[in-house]
Amino acid sequence: MKRIVYIFLCLSFVVACKEEPRVYEGHYPQAKFVEVVRDIYVAEAALKDVSSQQKDSLVAHYKSIIEELHQVDLKQVEADLEVIQSSPELYKKIHGIISDSVIMLEKRVNKQKEKKINRDKDSN
């Protein structure tokens, strides 16, 4: 009987001490954070084939554009990202949202490209 009580107490302790899943509590609303990080990913992808000499100046230029476009401080965004990365569960959740946002953006861009191609065909 003592053994059952001991096991029950241990299990209760483990369950009671289980950390609650973390939620995003950053400097900016989650939607804005996702848009900013998505734009950073897109900028990094655009620079993957650029020479390292040009890349340094373009990174600074893209960062300033992103800060101005979204009215954010990228140092605060980076700090939020570090906090998110410290929680695997939260990181997985936010990263999934950002990935979905990138996919939606790609679809939108591809649709616009298709429309432009069709307009060009129609005008010829």
Image (tube, rainbow, N blue to C red):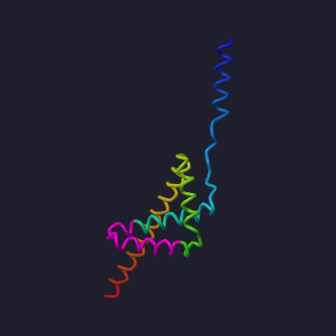
Give the vertical position of 122 relative to 58 (above or below).
Answer: below
- Percent of width and height locating residue 70: 57, 72
- Percent of width and height locating residue 98: 50, 59
Give the vertical position of 6 relative to 60 (above or below).
Answer: above
Q: Residue at x 61, y 47 (%)?
A: 22
Give the vertical position of 109 relative to 95 (above or below).
Answer: below
Q: Is residue 76 left or right of residue 16?
A: left
- Most distant residue in the bottom direction: 124
Q: Quadrant of residue 18?
A: top right
Q: Nearer the viewer, residue 27 or 93?
A: 27
Q: Residue at x 37, y 69 (%)?
A: 47
State yes or no: residue 61 in magenta: yes
Q: Residue at x 58, y 63 (%)?
A: 76
Q: Nearer the viewer, residue 7 or 113?
A: 7
Q: Is residue 8 left or right of residue 67?
A: right
Give the vertical position of 65 relative to 85 (above or below).
Answer: below
Q: Which residues are magenta?
A: 45-66
- Percent of width and height locating residue 54: 36, 74
Main SS class of the magenta portion in the image: helix
Q: Residue at x 49, y 64 (%)?
A: 38
State yes or no: residue 97 in magenta: no
Q: Quadrant of the C terminus?
A: bottom left
Q: Quadrant of the N terminus?
A: top right
- Percent of width and height locating residue 75: 56, 64
